[in-house]
Amino acid sequence: MMSRSYTNLLDLASGNFPVMGPVRERKRLTRVMTVPGVVSELDDDQANSVNSDVHSSVNQDRIIIVANQLPVKAKRGPDNKGWSFNWDDYSLLLQLKDGLPEEMEVLYVGSLKIDVDINEQDEVSSVLLEKFKCVPAFLPPEIFNKFYHGFCKQHLWSLFHYMLPYSANHGGRFDRSLWEAYVAANKIFSQRVIEVINPEDDYIWIHDYHLMVLPTFLRRRFNRLRMGFFLHSPFPSSEIYRTSPVREEILKALLNSDLIGFHTFDYARHFLSCCSRMLGLEYQSKRGYIGLEYYGRTIGIKIMPVGVHMEQIESALRVADKESRIHEFKQKFDGKTVLLGVDDMDVFKGVNLKLLAMEQMLKQHPKWQGRAVLVQITNPARGRGKDLEDTQAEIQASCKRINEMFGKPGYEPIVFIDRPISLTERVAYYTIAECVVVTAVRDGMNLTPYEYIACRQGVSESASSSESNGPKKSKLVVSEFIGCSPSLSGAIRVNPWNFEATAEAMNEAISMADAETQLQHEKHYRYVSSHDVAFWSHSFFQDMERTCKDHFRRRCWGIGLSFGFRVVALDPNFRKLSIDHIESVYVRSKNRAILLDYDGTVMPQTSHNKTPNAEVISIVNRLLGDTKNTVFVVSGRGKESLDKWFSPCKKLGIAAEHGYFMRWSSDDKWEVCGPNSEFRWKQIAEPVMRLYTEATDGSSIETKENVRPS
């Protein structure tokens, strides 16, 4: 059964209820830690946020890392019975532990890459929690397909990589049911987090675009939860992002985090621009930290590109050397200059643009014919769709055409590897490659250049003395549209759409003098080795601690429904006004001064018709009917307008033009309360103001009587 809190949220967010089949009640995991009080406080039917003022008796901090997939691999046991699990050593989620405090407990929440029968889910959950400290989120197939292959890949992935659905066959139109599935999947993830969370002691670190609305679900339950979010994809410019029909829902959900991380300054700048243009929020930079003020809370903005796991790469290098993979590839490409590409099969990786550049280089520089080889490794696609199928067909056709045009016995200019390869095999290719070429048209980070630099450095323990003791050099041609580009100052940056220029860059790279490539390599290696994945996670966690340090000293209230929910945080000395107390004091008082602001109190600020309606006039006259009341309307508007609008209210006092003119009732004359001033400056200012008014759409000049020239 869907909880009431879920249906309310989904109904208000989308206007529709998702069609969901019956889900079997699954027993909850045994809680590792609990909040003070009764466990039933965490039931889904609770509408109010859990906000205990009492700290847990458990003092050790713990971090819960939430991502779409757990860092574990699962497979069926012998005879298709039972399950066996082991760590996925290449998972970023597992690697980031190196940067966290040693004493900190790490718990993972995410889904598995395989389907688990509903009857086995409890057993699998228990094993993963006990042996791996992992909490699996099981998504029903009908939700998973719409969530991952639908909204994540068709909408968010395309949008964040600047692909707009101009037609139904290009990118796919926005589908409300996919958004509902996305919300439903995020709700399931939140339920799994809630089962094991201790909100007073735990940190939550959410990863990537699959879970962008998860912060709202968690913040609704725990006002003071310490929570960070890191986006591993690009964040598009506001002109692109604003095309999403759920743009504000996602922004407001992210703002329920305490710290939001991005790989590059550009991605953070785009996010801040969206918050400014769509939500009216402005950011401040203080002592090197960027913060957004949001209802009394300061949301930190973190800019820190992720790095590679140096020890893992060095270990793979040793294995590749021990297994003679490096020697094997050297013999295979003996006498050839190897250019290398390592990309996912994706429409945004620009693989075919790279092939076109290689073709152009061989045409423009015939000296490389028979000598230069592009080894293109393409990892299996993680999405699906017609765009991807077209991209695959185009790549295959280009490889065939180029090899037929320039190939000869013993030489193929394009070696296309379209299969999963191990890290050992990949680092062997890195080691023998003269140049790595990355031509993605849009990519969040792309660690291929970092891995290449680390592999070209080698390890001192390597058995290959020539590799370990010889000069270290690496050559890079990288797209200016990928996240790692700003940190590689020595790389040749290219616009991948201009494949002719890319071809010249490839020729320049493999023709570069050794002395220059050595200097560039040394500079790149210093950065890559010092800014590894541990440095990244350590820096993010430090900023999360700093951002959340005042959480338990604030008074917090959760307000709003649906994705408009936010937490209002106020100073500990703030006291909320009691309506009962105000009413009691009002009744007992003998004289009362009631000051009403016009725009925003008497009349809505968004109202186009500023004339008060009959109901407003009636309320004001009722207040004036009590002889104990003195009522004033205070406004920046002119006295003529206010006098006309409130002519039925004979006893009403009016302070016009911010108090420059004032009268106590309609029978009294207007008094000038401000100092007499000379207004000849208006003759100079007015032409300038008119010039800017004409150049600014929608602007106007409002003339006040108290600035009329003499």
Image (cartoon, rainbow, N blue to C red):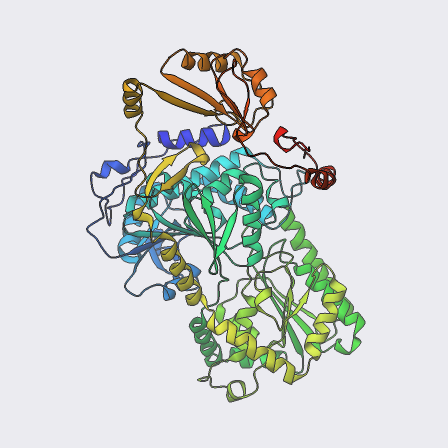
Residue 533 visible: yes
Q: Name the spot of residue 636 as percent of width and height, x first.
A: 55, 29
Residue plotted at (46% across, 24% down): 596
Give whichever of 421, 266 is nearer the camera.
Answer: 266
* Residue 472 x/y as whole percent: 56, 83
Residue 126: percent from left, percent from top: 27, 50
Q: Is residue 428 visible?
A: no
Q: Residue at x 48, y 47 (%)?
A: 210
Image quadrant containing the N terminus: top left
Taking 438 as reference, is 625 left or right? left
Residue 340 screen position, x and y as percent: 62, 70
Which image quarter: residue 674? Answer: top right
Q: Quadrant of residue 481?
A: bottom right
Query: Dividing the picture into quarters, in which one does residue 577 lie?
Result: top left
646 or 52, which lies in front? 646
Q: Reply above or below: 686 against 410.
A: above
Image position of 591 (left or right of 466):
left
